[in-house]
Amino acid sequence: MLSLTAATCIIDAALAEARSRNLAPMAVAVLDAGGHLVAYKREDGAGIVRFEIAFGKAWGSLGMGFGSRELAERVNKLPTFFTMVSAASGGRLIASPGGVLIKNDEGHVIGAVGISGDIGDEDEACAIAGIKASGLQSPSTVQK
């Protein structure tokens, strides 16, 4: 289960990382494993569509079972497939880095974070920093 406390920690740490990098204003959405919004924050100056983008990155990661970076790479290889998946999801998938799965200590997916505001690589770095600060894991932080 992804608690509100953990979701808030992820958001606050992700935003702190964004400020330390002097990035554009961010929006951060944290969803539970069922795709339900647990917490959201939008910095002053972030565009009004940033919620939908952040939510779509997280939701798409959960829906596909991998981060939105991988989704973006697959879109380039299989654009027709993505068109069908996008239609099936009601257009909720956002295929750009910044959506990262959240795992517990046992390696089970318990949610996802999506960030929008800067370029995808920076969004993703902030998402990973937020997850690490919470004590949870992202696929890139899982110990093998």
Image: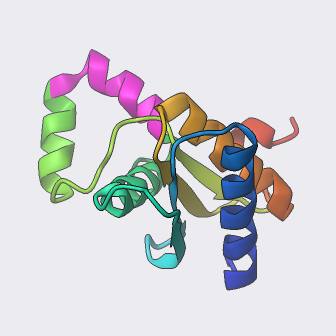
In the drawing, does residue 16 fall left or right of residue 63?
right
29 drawn magenta: no
Whole-percent x, y for residue 124 in the image? 59, 39
Q: How many marks?
A: 0
In the drawing, does residue 39 fall left or right of residue 6?
left
Toward which corner of the image does residue 73 lie, by quadrant? top left
**Whether residue 91 is situated above or below residue 12 in the rendered picture:** above
Q: Quadrant of the C terminus?
A: top right
Toward which corner of the image does residue 21 lie, by quadrant? top right
Q: How is the image coloured?
A: rainbow
**Whether residue 111 is situated above or below residue 83 in the rendered picture:** below
In the drawing, does residue 128 fall left or right of residue 52?
right
What's the residue at 41%, 50% (across, down)?
57
Q: What kind of secondary structure does the magenta stretch mostly adopt?
A: helix
Whole-percent x, y for residue 37 in the image? 47, 76
What's the residue at 66%, 56% (across, down)?
15
Q: Quadrant of the N terminus?
A: bottom right
Whole-percent x, y for residue 66 in the image? 51, 42
Q: Which residues are magenta?
A: 68-79
Q: Is residue 105 visible?
A: no
What's the residue at 38%, 29% (across, down)?
72
In the drawing, does residue 132 fall left or right of residue 26?
right
Residue sitting nearer the eye, 21 or 134: 21
